[in-house]
Image (cartoon, rainbow, N blue to C red):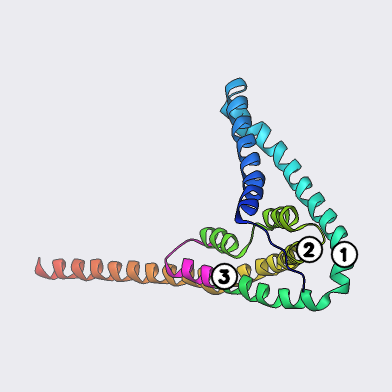
Amino acid sequence: TTEIHVSIGEVAKNVGIYMAVPFVAALLTWYTLTKLKGAPWYFDKFTPRIGVLTLIALLFTIIVLFASQSERISSHLDKVIYAAVPLLIYFLFMFIVSFLMSWWLGATYEQAVALSFTAASNNFELALAVAIASFGLKSDPALMSVVGALIEIPTMLALVYMAFWFRKSLFETKAVDHDAALVDAMEMQQTEHEAAGDYSKQTI
């Protein structure tokens, strides 16, 4: 076995670089453009355009990293399987528990979806960057980070269909029960009004 010794300071430095630099750049961009162009232009014009570039950069990063690790993935399938099993359990457990907890607490379907996907997903872009910077491109942590992204992407797509199933089985049923209870309450109220009217006529 090969031992790799990496200090906490080195890992913290890499995390700081890959988190602090984009954060500071975003703050400077927001502050500068809102002063020059105004907040409406920034949110209505600039943000949608820069969002497309973000998606393109993410796809480019995924393609490059998969290409760089393709040979190691195919030659170390045992490690891929070992990493895939706990990741699948984690994604399913976090998604289902978060969804059911949101439903139990009375959240809307939209709120439950946002919470569940946020809880189940991982920031694999940051994990890839830190793993490569700290341990090297050919290291096992870098390989496992790529495998994590490889497992996460199709799993998240599959969880979309699970979210649709939850909507039909939990939220639409809850809405139907609520409507039925509302109709019953209205009918009961109407019956009480009619009974009160009949009693008034008899009294007169």
Quarter of the image where one finds residue 80: bottom right
In the rendered structure, the answer to whether residue 191 lies left or right of residue 62 reads left
Q: Dot 3, how many residues are within 10 Å of its Cα: few (below 14), some (14-19), or many (20+)?
A: some
Q: Amino acid at mark 3?
A: Met
Task: Between label 3 and label 1, give the one nearer the viewer.
Answer: 1
Residue that label 1 marks: 70
Q: Position of residue 87 (x, y in %)?
A: 67, 72
Q: Quadrant of the N terminus?
A: bottom right
Give the SS element for disc 2. Answer: loop
Q: Position of residue 19 (x, y in %)?
A: 63, 46
Residue that label 3 marks: 94
Q: Of the residues under marks 2 and 1, which one precedes in the sequence?
A: 1
Residue 104 sits inside the magenta stretch: yes
Q: Are marks 2 and 1 in contact (CB under 8 Å)?
A: no
Q: Of the residues under marks 3 and 1, which one precedes in the sequence?
A: 1
Q: Position of residue 96 (x, y in %)?
A: 56, 72
Residue, x 63% and y 50% (percent of image)? 15
Q: Which residues are magenta?
A: 97-109
Q: Nearer the viewer, residue 67 or 132?
A: 132
How far apart marks 2 and 3 lie (CA) works out to 28 Å
Residue 139: which disc? 2
Q: Position of residue 202 (x, y in %)?
A: 13, 71
Give the SS element for disc 3. Answer: helix
How far apart marks 2 and 1 lie (CA) works out to 13 Å
Q: Amino acid at mark 1?
A: Ser
Residue, x 22% and y 71% (percent of image)? 195
Q: Dot 2, how many residues are within 10 Å of its Cα: few (below 14), some (14-19), or many (20+)?
A: some
Q: Nearer the viewer, residue 95 or 204?
A: 95
